[in-house]
Amino acid sequence: MRKNIVAGNWKMNTTLQEGVALAEEVNAAVKAAEHNCDVVICVPFTHLATISEKICKDSLGLGAENCADHKSGAYTGEVSAAMVASTGAGYVILGHSERRQYYGETSETLREKVALAFENNLTPIFCIGEVLEERENGTYFDVVKKQIVDALFHLSAEDFGKIILAYEPVWAIGTGKTATADQAEDMHAFIRGVIAEKYGKEVADNTSILYGGSCKPSNAKELFAKPDVDGGLIGGAALKCADFMGIVEAFN
Ligand code: PGA
């Protein structure tokens, strides 16, 4: 059966020293806490190697927030999936809306990134979600379906089964405006149906679909109680250990 997962997305926050301190704090808290989910932190590239040595990866997974769409070579400033994997990280966030919006990521580049993640045994946390206008004009199901179909439906069932999906309505990211638990469930159930149509019910039932967008300790329990919401991708609230743990402990 699918896993419950709470993953932090630190974005472009913390210096190396601050990040290491936060990771150590979270690592200790996760070990001590009662929870019934996998916990992952996705951190800036510069922090990966150091944090990898400081945490116990059996209890706290480590991931990058992105990787390059090329294997290696003359791509100044890029960081490859192989480089990420060589730090000991096991996950990579791909297709975050901020990457799509500010750095022009398309389904085409994301297909390359997913392939390179797999080649390097990284588990993609693959983000999808509509913008406010698409929510308001009622096209949000179509938009999210297209994001999944275009970037992922060329995969074999076996490879698709390695992906963690994160539904993040863009209008809820960093805005304090959370999708209601019912809005999240509607979309998650829809996504699971789209997967079932293509890969069958078993693959769909085994896919973890996380919710992201202003998830916090006060709303996590209600969101995670929904049958198709398998956890969260947490931005702002992942930067304070107590807040992040409040969300982790929503699964207990
Ligand atoms: P937020 O970000 O929790 O700060 O809304 C979530 C994300 O973008 O992954």
Image (cartoon, rainbow, N blue to C red):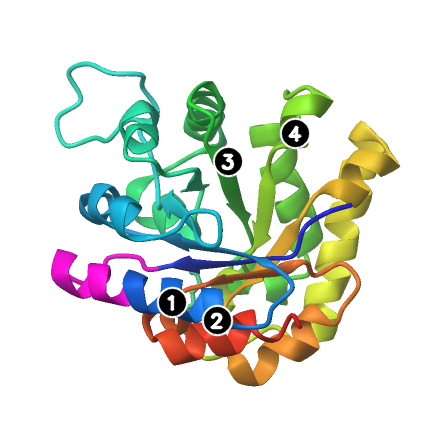
Q: Secondary structure at mark 1?
A: helix
* Number of other residues with Cα within 10 Å of mark 2, as a class: few under 14, some 14 to 19, many 20 or more: few
Q: Nearer the viewer, mark 4 or mark 1?
A: 1
Q: Label 4 amino acid? A: Phe
Query: For the residue with label 2, is its CB less than 8 Å from the closest atom of ligand 1?
Result: no
Residue at 32% across / 60% down in the picture? 10
Specify which label sits upstream in the sequence, 2 or 3.
Answer: 2
Cα separation between marks 2 and 4: 33 Å
Residue 233, placed above or below residue 197: below
Q: Secondary structure at mark 4?
A: helix
Residue at 32% across / 70% down in the picture? 239
Kindly check if marks 4 and 3 are in contact, taking CB atoms under 8 A apart as contact.
no
Q: Label 1 amino acid? A: Ala
Specify which label sits upstream in the sequence, 4 or 1.
Answer: 1
Cα separation between marks 3 and 1: 24 Å
Residue 31, placed above or below residue 153: below
Cα separation between marks 4 and 3: 11 Å
Residue that label 1 marks: 28
Q: Secondary structure at mark 2?
A: helix
Kindly check if marks 2 and 4 are in contact, taking CB atoms under 8 A apart as contact.
no
Q: Nearer the viewer, mark 3 or mark 1?
A: 1
Counting every numbered tag in the picture gives 4
Quarter of the image where ligand 1 sits: bottom left
Residue that label 4 marks: 160
Residue that label 3 marks: 123
Query: Where is residue 21 shown, x and y percent of the image?
Result: 22, 66
* Res. 13 visible in picture: no
- In which quadrant of the rendered image does the C terminus lie? bottom right
- In which quadrant of the rendered image does the N terminus lie? top right
Q: Which residues are magenta?
A: 10-22
Q: Nearer the viewer, mark 2 or mark 3?
A: 2
Query: Where is residue 147 shown, x and y percent of the image?
Result: 58, 39
